[in-house]
């Protein structure tokens, strides 16, 4: 029996002003092709199906299209919610979907839902754990000691009868760590996950009852603790920090003389995400330009700021996402002690100094008047400042 493990689809996401719906449709079509080529029996989708709790119409339609095509192929779907999803919205219609073997667990109701499949005489139990917080689990287990995410997940599993003579698969969306080792961060989850520190961290040993744990939440594909616990990673690159990642989908085979076999199938996007660095003249030289339809992040090393640099780059790379500078001025700014920068200095002094360091010239009175008006509107300064 074969499964494809996906996660962190983030349907409806954008890169800056660029809508990714066509890129996402392209990669889902490729995943459907892989599902057919490998004759898979099921798809495991480990959360963050949508990018926002209120998804766009395009995102909802794309998920509907994907699920309909899977159902027509007779491929089962096991899908849980992630922290980006609205539990109730993702759960809508789940009762009707079950008639087409599309199983959705988006709202935690005190139980770890399971579907039993058979591979010959071997039972394969697929459990689904939506993204849960300690408060949600505490509601259903008031007598348990639950202070954090780790306590919450362990409580749910401890109160679930898991038959270890069966092959057991868990689909979950949580931050799981190995012994003395965190997963490699990347993408939109990295900042938030690191900032919560130990509160959100779940020890991988709590999944000992499961042969394979299909995880979502971290965008870089990787194992955690042991081969049978794995993040699929996002199918597309969703940030600059993922530019060097190789995206893939995980193929999980159970039975056939071995309980679990894990392989990865590479995913090639319609448009890659790349980071280029150097002086503008060299970067835009036709001899150096390649794959101009990719999403491009630019680091310029020119000492002088180039007026309308974005306009120049978008003539060559129409999907330029961001331009930043790395030169002597920006490095000098980075070395400033920000905690003391505002000591005994007025708003006008701070803005003029910043402008001088970035552009190398003095700010005009007219420009300062615009900045002060904007600051008043934002409530940063008041009329008397």
Image: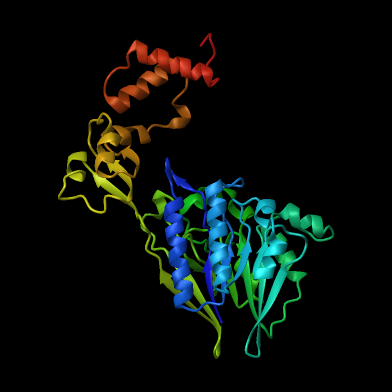
Left or right of residue 44: residue 288:
left
Front residue of this view, candidates 163 and 359: 163
Residue 346: image location, x then y, percent:
45, 16
Residue 159: image location, x then y, percent:
78, 69
Residue at the limit of the structure toward the left, as seen here: 287
Residue 248 placement: quadrant: bottom left
Residue 14: image location, x then y, percent:
46, 46
Left or right of residue 342: residue 217:
right
**Residue 202 visible to an observer of this rendering:** yes
Query: How many marks on residues?
Result: 0
Image: 48 above or below 113: above
Residue 247 placement: quadrant: bottom left
Residue at the limit of the structure toward the right, as seen here: 143
Image: 181 above or below 75: above
Left or right of residue 357: residue 120:
right
Q: Residue at x 44, y 26 (%)?
A: 341
Q: Residue at x 66, y 63 (%)?
A: 104
Quadrant of the image containing the N terminus = bottom right
Front residue of this view, candidates 161 and 43: 43
Q: Residue at x 69, y 69 (%)?
A: 99
Colour mode of the rendering? rainbow
**Residue 335 visible to an observer of this rendering:** no
Residue 96: image location, x then y, percent:
70, 63
Image: 61 above or below 351: below
Residue 212 placement: quadrant: bottom right
Front residue of this view, candidates 260 and 223: 260
Residue at the limit of the structure toward the front, as seen here: 72
């Amino acid at each position: 029996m074969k499964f494809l493990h996906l996660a962190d689809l983030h349907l409806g996401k954008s890169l800056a002003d660029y809508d990714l719906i066509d890129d996402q449709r392209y990669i889902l079509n490729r995943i459907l092709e892989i599902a057919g080529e490998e004759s898979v029996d099921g798809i495991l989708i480990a959360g963050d199906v949508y990018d926002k709790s209120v998804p766009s119409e395009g995102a909802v339609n794309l998920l509907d299209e994907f699920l309909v095509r899977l159902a027509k192929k007779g491929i089962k779907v096991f899908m849980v919610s992630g922290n980006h999803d609205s539990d109730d919205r993702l759960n809508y219609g789940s009762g009707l979907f079950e008639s087409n073997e599309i199983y959705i667990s988006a709202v935690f109701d005190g139980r770890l839902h399971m579907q039993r499949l058979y591979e010959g005489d071997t039972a394969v139990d697929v459990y689904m754990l939506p993204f849960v917080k300690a408060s949600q689990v505490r509601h259903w287990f008031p007598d348990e000691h639950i202070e954090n995410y780790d306590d919450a997940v362990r409580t749910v599993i401890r109160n679930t009868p898991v038959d270890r003579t069966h092959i057991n698969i868990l689909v979950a969306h949580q931050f799981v760590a190995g012994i003395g080792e965190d997963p490699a961060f990347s993408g939109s989850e990295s900042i938030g996950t690191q900032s919560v520190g130990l509160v959100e961290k779940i020890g991988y040993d709590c999944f000992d009852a499961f042969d394979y744990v299909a995880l979502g939440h971290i965008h870089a594909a990787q194992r955690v603790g042991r081969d049978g616990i794995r993040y699929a990673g996002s199918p597309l690159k969703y940030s600059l920090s993922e530019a060097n990642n190789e995206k893939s989908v995980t193929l999980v085979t159970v039975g056939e003389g071995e309980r679990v076999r894990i392989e990865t199938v590479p995913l090639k996007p319609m448009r890659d995400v790349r980071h280029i660095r150097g002086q503008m003249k060299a970067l835009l030289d036709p001899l150096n330009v390649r794959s101009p339809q990719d999403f491009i992040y630019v680091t310029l090393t020119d000492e002088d700021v180039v007026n309308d640099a974005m306009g120049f780059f978008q003539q060559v790379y129409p999907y330029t996402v961001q331009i930043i500078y790395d030169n002597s001025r920006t490095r000098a700014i980075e070395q400033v002690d920000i905690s003391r920068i505002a000591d005994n200095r007025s708003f006008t002094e701070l803005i003029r100094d910043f402008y001088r360091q970035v552009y190398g010239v003095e700010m005009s009175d007219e420009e300062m008047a615009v900045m002060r008006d904007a600051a008043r509107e934002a409530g940063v300064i008041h009329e008397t400042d």
